[in-house]
Image (cartoon, helix red, strand yellow):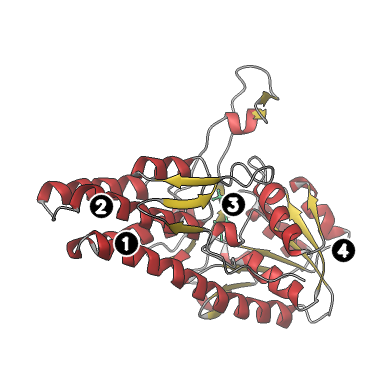
Amino acid sequence: MSKPSDQPSLRWDDHAIVTLDQRALPHERRLLRLSTVDDVITAITTLAVRGAPSIGLAGALGVALSAYAHCSQGSTQDGRTAVEGDAQRLAAARPTAVNLAWAVDRALAKLGDGPDAVLAEATAMIDEDLAVNRRMVAHAVQAVRDRCPQRSLRLLTHCNTGRLATAAVGTALGTILALADSGRVTEVLVNETRPLLQGARLTAWELAEAGVPHRVCVDSAAAASMRQGLVDCVIVGADRITARGDVANKIGTYALAIAAAHHGIPFIVVAPESSWDRSLADGRDIVIEERADDEVTSCGGIRTTPLGTRAYNPAFDVTPASLITAIVSEHGVHHTSEVSA
Ligand SMILES: CSC[C@@H](O)[C@@H](O)C(=O)COP(=O)(O)O
């Protein structure tokens, strides 16, 4: 049966970052070698590397690449300024997931001790993410069991929150795989996650690899699936969580939470402490990334709309704390009523 994978999804190899190109999945298992800061920024903006924890780790390793490029002969003011500029560009590659700026800042803070120290911090963060995910998944499995005591669960998830989106194991999908491993999952409905199909391409790939029964669900059929009694619990990840527990996550998450609340279905968010941004209270203050029109107006390189049609293409939305049953991190379960301001 399934077992959350402990193989790191990205690693440092001789002055380069090596990772799977998530744009090529599920058709091709293509390895990417990122050896400059620009390579890392392109990989993050094109979603070759994606998922809040993964882009943070790539960003931190990107600071190490910059430190070796500009400070390997000793640290000059010009060298430090260049690395700081690269760190700023890395942190700005995608604005919504707080993990990116958090991880880049953490790596940059080691610059005074030289490039090796920056790299050591970035690689330590990969090991930490793995350990954090294991602890978080244990808490999240318990949170689901507490709310869904039946032996056999039908789960619904959105986007991809597995080992591809983290160092390893995953958050929401790690939880689903752990529940499946204990024989408790009858079926996972995987929202296809338009427009870039992270659910259909990546989550279905991870579930198939683990041998967990699943069907891809048309995004707009999720509410109907709940009404038909096909869903016992919704489990998703997060890109940024405010002090009062409002959650930014992949576009479509808010609609799922509304539908789950309407049908009395538990809605559980699984995300590490590094996804919390306690400087914000109201989720409406989270910057939401807007992506290119052509992600919506064409499919597989073929235009699906009349020439010149514009698109509304926010990559994320915000679910208010009041719609969330529980938020789970490596520290345990936060009931949204407990974290509300
Ligand atoms: C553990 S990943 C959590 C989130 O980052 C995930 O749910 C998500 O929304 C990813 O969006 P993406 O645009 O694919 O990077």
Q: SS at mark 4?
A: loop
Q: Nearer the viewer, residue 140 or 112?
A: 112
Q: Nearer the viewer, mark 4 or mark 1?
A: 1
User: How far apart are the two marked residues, 2 and 4, measured between alpha carbons?
Assistant: 55 Å
Say which mark, if any, is on residue 119: 1
Q: Nearer the viewer, residue 244 or 225?
A: 225
User: How far apart are the two marked residues, 3 and 1, measured between alpha carbons?
Assistant: 30 Å
The amino acid pointed to by label 2 is Tyr
User: How far apart are the two marked residues, 4 and 1, measured between alpha carbons?
Assistant: 49 Å
Instruction: Kindly tell me whether mark 3's CB lies below 8 Å from ligand 1.
Output: yes
Say whether marks 2 and 1 touch (CB < 8 Å).
yes
- Report x, y in % for residue 97: 47, 55
Position of 145 relative to 187 (above/below): below
Say whether marks 3 and 1 touch (CB < 8 Å).
no
Q: Which of marks 2 and 4 is nearer the N terminus?
A: 2
The amino acid pointed to by label 4 is Gly
Label 2 belongs to which residue? Answer: 68
Residue drawn at x 20%, y 48% as measured from the top left: 70
* Mark 2 Cα-neighbour bin, 10 Å: few <14, some 14–19, many ≥20: some
Q: Earlier in the sequence, mark 4 or mark 1?
A: 1
User: How far apart are the two marked residues, 3 and 2, measured between alpha carbons?
Assistant: 34 Å
